[in-house]
Image: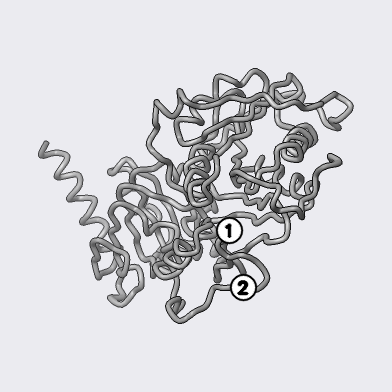
Amino acid sequence: MAANFNSADIGAFKNVWVFCEQRQGEMMPTTFELISEGRKLADELGVELCGILLGDDVDGLAKEIGGYGADKVYVCNSPLLKYYTTDAYAKVICDVVEEIKPEIMLFGASNIGRDLAPRCAARLHTGLCADCTHLDVDLDGYVNFLRTGSSLDVDNMSFESKLFDVNSNLKMTRPAFGGHLMATIVCPRFRPAMATVRPGVMKKRPFDAAKAEALEIIHPEFALSEADIQTEVVEVVKAAAKLVDLIGADFIVSVGRGISKDVEGGIKLAEELAAELGGVVGSSRACVDSGWISADHQVGQTGKTVHPKVYIALGISGAIQHKAGMQDSECIIAVNKNENAPIFEVADYGIVGDLFKVVPLMIDSIRAAKAAK
């Protein structure tokens, strides 16, 4: 650790940083979501937003990061960084952080981010909040988030604390106890405050070409040798298995516990409806826990957060954990036999009825509309 680095000297830290994840020269989409969210946090603090990008000759990727809001990108190039290894990436990031001292650092909750962030946090002697779904610095913004996203009586609550400044600390919200509660974590005694953020949770800003051109690219000094790396990447093999792309889908048809009387039939109906719409099938946690469908279909706080053009909920009651993962969809259509199901609170269109009778009618209507064109 650098001699002048003290994670408890919080006054020495400034600016918001985002780890910009690239693989084989291609930027991961989560990076642009985090840069967009980091821009909001940096503006709340009145500081700069910076990316840190590691790889081998990856300067050409930096401009794109600027287009989504970054003021600067620290680019670390080395043949030893061409492929991700925990040892190499953690050493370089920690060396640069110890020298420049950012106050907030965000990572995507990808396989790489979940491996890298805790290693860096431990070396830097600071805290890490994993799998965040919401971030705030501004207290008013956080209180408004609670007002609209929880059942708390926030207007009669005090958020002041004698232990830390609530107006300057990053407030990191994540699911807890299997998704049954939401917890907000702060890191008041050490810096940088670090968080991993779930893919698809944060909304990407529109690309700004002028901002991309104004980006400042900096090459910080770092030392890295083969002796620092305990593993060798011999070959990169991409899995042939195709997972459902919920985050990128415009149309999602999700199934819930309401398919229990005919699980196979219910999933088949959802697949047929999704196929007619050019979409994919999602599910509630109940279906995954029951073993009816694989976990990559799960929508919600403990699954994926989605923002499709149309979200169709079939037999989903609408637990708060599920609603939090889909309530920002442009249009929500709910089908449920229970007219008092919570899902109708967020639905733009609600159909009270048996999904096994309603969905075939929906499929027929879509086919008829297509044939009439």
- Report the residue marked by disc 1: 168
Circle 1 sits in a helix, a strand or a loop, which is it? loop
Instruction: Name the residue rendered at 54%, 53% in the picture.
Output: 295
**Type of amino acid under label 2:** Ser
- Report the residue marked by disc 2: 161
Query: Would you place residue 255 above or below residue 317 in this image?
Result: above
Instruction: Name the residue rendered at 52%, 45% in the picture.
Output: 38
Q: Mark 1 and mark 2: span between their CA atoms?
A: 12 Å
> Percent position (x, y) of residue 191?
70, 52
Q: Nearer the viewer, residue 296 or 99?
A: 99
Q: How is the image coloured?
A: one colour
Question: How many numbered marks does the figure carry?
Answer: 2
Quarter of the image with the C terminus is: top left
Circle 2 sits in a helix, a strand or a loop, which is it? loop
Most extreme residue toward the front is 11
Is residue 94 toward the left or the right of residue 36 in the image?
right
Instruction: Name the residue rendered at 40%, 26% in the picture.
Output: 210
Most extreme residue toward the right is 227
Q: Nearer the viewer, residue 157 or 3?
A: 3
> Percent position (x, y) of residue 263?
43, 61
Q: Which mark is residue 246?
A: none
Q: Within 10 angstroms of label 1, few (less than 14), some, or many (20 or more) residues?
A: some
> Percent position (x, y) of residue 164?
65, 66
**Type of amino acid under label 1:** Ser
> Percent position (x, y) of residue 359?
27, 57
- Whichever of labels 1 and 2 marks the residue nearer the N terminus, that label is 2
Q: Is residue 260 visible?
A: no
Q: Nearer the viewer, residue 285 or 161?
A: 161
Quarter of the image with the N terminus is: top right
Query: Would you place residue 164 above or below residue 331 in this image?
Result: below
